[in-house]
Image (tube, helix red, strand yellow):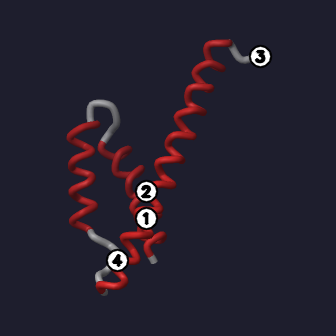
Amino acid sequence: MKMPTEINEKRSQIDKIDIKLMDLLVKRMKLSRQIGNIKKNLNIGYKDVEREKLILRNLKERYLEHLSDDEITSFFKTIFDLSIKNQK
């Protein structure tokens, strides 16, 4: 079955957004590695629970009308985990 043009157009837009998301994730991971190096030199732990709480609180204040609390938390928990893995 051939997809309607409208669906293909929306999917094309999503593909472009996915590329932008990945570009931003790569930039975030590079910064995480730099932070990890600084933390290692200063003998500071990699996980900063208070920082994670602050980020989530700020994002939820801004985006809760568009995404649920669980969606925001789940998405950023994955990003936080990747960042910590990247810092080590």
Residue 79 rendering spot, x and y as whole percentages: 43, 57
* Mark closer to the observer (4, 3): 4
User: Which of disc 2 and disc 1 is earlier in sequence?
Assistant: 2
User: Which of disc 1 and disc 4 is earlier in sequence?
Assistant: 4
- Residue at the (61%, 26%) spot, across then down: 11
Q: Are marks 3 and 2 in contact (CB under 8 Å)?
A: no
Q: Residues within 10 Å of mark 4 (few under 14, many from 20)?
A: few
Tell me how far mark 4 sits from mark 2, CA to CA.
15 Å
Q: Can you tell which quarter of the image residue 42 is in?
A: bottom left
Tell me how far mark 4 sits from mark 3, CA to CA.
53 Å
User: Which of disc 2 and disc 3 is earlier in sequence?
Assistant: 3
User: Which of disc 2 and disc 4 is earlier in sequence?
Assistant: 2
Q: Are marks 4 and 2 in contact (CB under 8 Å)?
A: no
Q: The C terminus lies in which quarter of the figure?
A: bottom left
The residue carrying mark 1 is 83
Q: Is residue 18 left or right of residue 4?
A: left
The residue carrying mark 2 is 28
* Mark closer to the observer (1, 3): 1
Q: Residues within 10 Å of mark 2 (few under 14, many from 20)?
A: some
What SS does tag 4 mark? helix
User: Which of disc 3 and disc 4 is earlier in sequence?
Assistant: 3
* Mark closer to the observer (4, 2): 4
The residue carrying mark 3 is 2
The residue carrying mark 4 is 38
Q: Are marks 4 and 3 in contact (CB under 8 Å)?
A: no
